[in-house]
Amino acid sequence: MPQLRTVTIASAGDTSTSAEIGAKNIEFELSSILMEAVTFTGTKLTFQADYTGTWHDVYDTFGQLYSIPVASGSAMKVSLPADVFKDISKVRVVSDASEASERTIKFVFADVLEG
């Protein structure tokens, strides 16, 4: 059964709190994010991962900074590529602008052991 973990970007902030993935994706893997129909100040989100106690930007397999566009005012579910988010223990999002209000984003974690 999938799990939801909520992160928050504070008002006037651009970086969210973090979500724990757990034991190097043994039981769960990050599968998508959910965003409510709110007006985001930023127009795209990037991601940072904590591998060893230090935050690093997340890049795709082509060496490009991984980002998703934000459809301001629309609820969104965005599937995330497993290869980009493999082998990380914590993840957070970064808006490309300081948010005018608090923003909530939900990470969906899929149970990799569930068939």
Image (cartoon, rainbow, N blue to C red):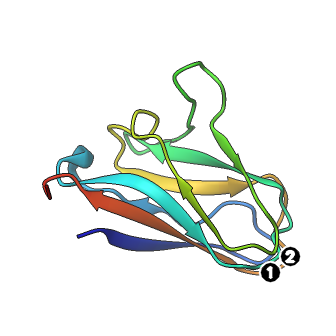
- Residue 109: x and y in percent read 35, 61
Q: Residue at x 76, y 58 (%)?
A: 70
Q: Position of residue 9 (x, y in %)?
A: 67, 71
Residue at label 2?
Answer: 100
User: What amino acid does circle 1 point to?
Assistant: Ser
Relative to 42, say whether 89 is above or below. above
Q: Is residue 86 left or right of residue 28?
A: right
User: 36 left or right of 78?
Assistant: right
Q: Residue 49, percent across and down? A: 48, 45
Q: Callout 1 environment at 10 Å: few (<14), some (14 to 19), or many (20+)? A: some
Residue at the (20%, 52%) spot, across then down: 112
**Label 1 element class:** loop
> What is the spatial separation of the Cα atoms under label 2 and label 1, in whole angstroms?
4 Å
Q: Position of residue 57 (x, y in %)?
A: 59, 38
Q: Are marks 2 and 1 in contact (CB under 8 Å)?
A: yes
Q: Residue furthest front?
A: 115
Residue 101: give its label. 1
